[in-house]
Image (tube, rainbow, N blue to C red):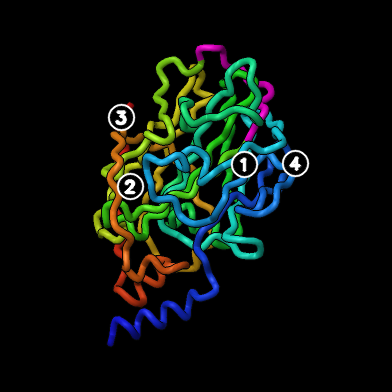
C-alpha cells in the first residue's frame, strides 16, 4: 500500500512530463538554427532529425551514432574554430528537458575529403572528444541546467583543420544506472563547416578516439553506476578529451564534482577535461525496469523526498594521460 501511495504521488507530480528529448536549437557564429522535432516533418536545419525522443538503451545499437534513426540534415552550419557554440534541448515543443542526473559529452569527427557533412554516414567514423561536463562547482550535474531551458556551451577546438565535421552531442541519464542496462542515452548530431582551423592533416596523431556504436560498455564505471552512492567517484566513459599540438586547443582540467545540494537545479555547470577509462563494448541488455525512478521527470529532489536523502558525491577520479 505504501509503495502504491508513493507511486501515485510521484505519478501525479510528473504526469505532464515525458522526460526525453532532442536538440532544440544550435547557435554557431551568432546564428541560431532550429532543430527538427523528433518524428515530425522535416525542416531546413544542420541538426540531424531523430525518429523519437524515447531513451536509447542499446549500447551497441546503431542509434548510438547520432540518435535513433537519425537522418542527414539539409544544412551545414558555418562555425569558426576556437569559437563557442550553444545547444538547447527539449522534450517536445514547449517542454524542456526533465532529467538532472548524469553527464553531457561532445565529440567530433572530420568528414573525409571529397564528401560533405550532409551526405556523410559517421557510423564507422573515429570520434574525438572535445568536451564533457559532470558535476559543477554548484554541486549539480550539467544536465540539470537544461531543465530550465539553459543552453549548454561547447568550444570548437582551434587546432583542428578547417573543413566539414559532424558534432555528436550526448546526454547520459543515470537515474536508473545502478542496475546494469538501466542507463539512458540521448544523442544528436550537428553538421558543421569549420573555418579558420590551424591543425594539419595529422591532427589526430596520438589522440584517443572512439567509434559509436562501440565506444562504451554496459560495464563502464560511468555507465553502470549508483549516482546516489555517498562516495561516488564518477569516471566519464569514452576517451579522454582530445589535446592537440598547441595548448590553446586543449581544454584545461577543472574540478567537476563537489557537494550535491537540493536547490532548484537551474544553473549552468562548467565543462571539465577529466580523463576517462577506455571501454569494451558488450551486447548484453537488461530487462525493462519497474523501478519508480523510471517514471518521467524523476529528479534528485524527488529521490530525496520519497526515497531518502541524496548523498554528496566525493571528488571525481581523474585518470592520467
- Residue name at image x 56 percent, y 12 percent: 200
Q: Nearer the viewer, mark 4 or mark 3?
A: 4
- Upstream in sequence: badge 3 or badge 1: 1
- Upstream in sequence: badge 2 or badge 1: 1
Q: Position of residue 294 (x, y in %)?
A: 38, 65
Mark drawn on residue 320: 3
> How far is the residue under mark 2 from the one under mark 4?
34 Å
User: Which residue does the numbered mark 1 point to in the structure image?
Assistant: 48
> How far is the residue under mark 3 from the one under mark 2?
20 Å
- Upstream in sequence: badge 2 or badge 4: 4
Mark 3 Cα within 10 Å, few/some/many (few <14, many 20+)?
few
Q: Nearer the viewer, mark 2 or mark 1?
A: 1
Q: Is residue 225 visible?
A: no
User: Which residue does the numbered mark 4 point to in the structure image?
Assistant: 31
Q: Position of residue 302 (x, y in %)?
A: 40, 72
User: Which residue does the numbered mark 2 point to in the structure image?
Assistant: 223
Q: Position of residue 5 (x, y in %)?
A: 34, 85
Q: Position of residue 84 (x, y in %)?
A: 62, 37
Amino acid at each position: 500500500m505504501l509503495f502504491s501511495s508513493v507511486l501515485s504521488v510521484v505519478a501525479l507530480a510528473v504526469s505532464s512530463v515525458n522526460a526525453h528529448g532532442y536538440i532544440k536549437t544550435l547557435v554557431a557564429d551568432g546564428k541560431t538554427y532550429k532543430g527538427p522535432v523528433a518524428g515530425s516533418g522535416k525542416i531546413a536545419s544542420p541538426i540531424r532529425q531523430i525518429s523519437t525522443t524515447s531513451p536509447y538503451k542499446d549500447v551497441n545499437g546503431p542509434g548510438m551514432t547520432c540518435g535513433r534513426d537519425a537522418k542527414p540534415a539539409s544544412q551545414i552550419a558555418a562555425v569558426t574554430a576556437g569559437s563557442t557554440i550553444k545547444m538547447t534541448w527539449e522534450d517536445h515543443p514547449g517542454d524542456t528537458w526533465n532529467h538532472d542526473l548524469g553527464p553531457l559529452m561532445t565529440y567530433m569527427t572530420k568528414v573525409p575529403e571529397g564528401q560533405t557533412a550532409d551526405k556523410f554516414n559517421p557510423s564507422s567514423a573515429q570520434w574525438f572528444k572535445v568536451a564533457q561536463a559532470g558535476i559543477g562547482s554548484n554541486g549539480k550535474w550539467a544536465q540539470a541546467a537544461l531543465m530550465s531551458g539553459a543552453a549548454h556551451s561547447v568550444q570548437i577546438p582551434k587546432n583542428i583543420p578547417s573543413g566539414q565535421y559532424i558534432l555528436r552531442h550526448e546526454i547520459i541519464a543515470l537515474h536508473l544506472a545502478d542496475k546494469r542496462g538501466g542507463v539512458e542515452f540521448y544523442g544528436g548530431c550537428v553538421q558543421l563547416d569549420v573555418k579558420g582551423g590551424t591543425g594539419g592533416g595529422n591532427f589526430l596523431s596520438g589522440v584517443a578516439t572512439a567509434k559509436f556504436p562501440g565506444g562504451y560498455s554496459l560495464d563502464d564505471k560511468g555507465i553502470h553506476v549508483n549516482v546516489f552512492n555517498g562516495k561516488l567517484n564518477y569516471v566519464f566513459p569514452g576517451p579522454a578529451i582530445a589535446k592537440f599540438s598547441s595548448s590553446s586547443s586543449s581544454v584545461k582540467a577543472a574540478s567537476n564534482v563537489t557537494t550535491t545540494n537540493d536547490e532548484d537545479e537551474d544553473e549552468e555547470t562548467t565543462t571539465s577535461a577529466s580523463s576517462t577509462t577506455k571501454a569494451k563494448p558488450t551486447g548484453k541488455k537488461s530487462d525493462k525496469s519497474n523501478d519508480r525512478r523510471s517514471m518521467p521527470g524523476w529528479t534528485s529532489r524527488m529521490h530525496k523526498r520519497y526515497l531518502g536523502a541524496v548523498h554528496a558525491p566525493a571528488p571525481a577520479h581523474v585518470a592520467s594521460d
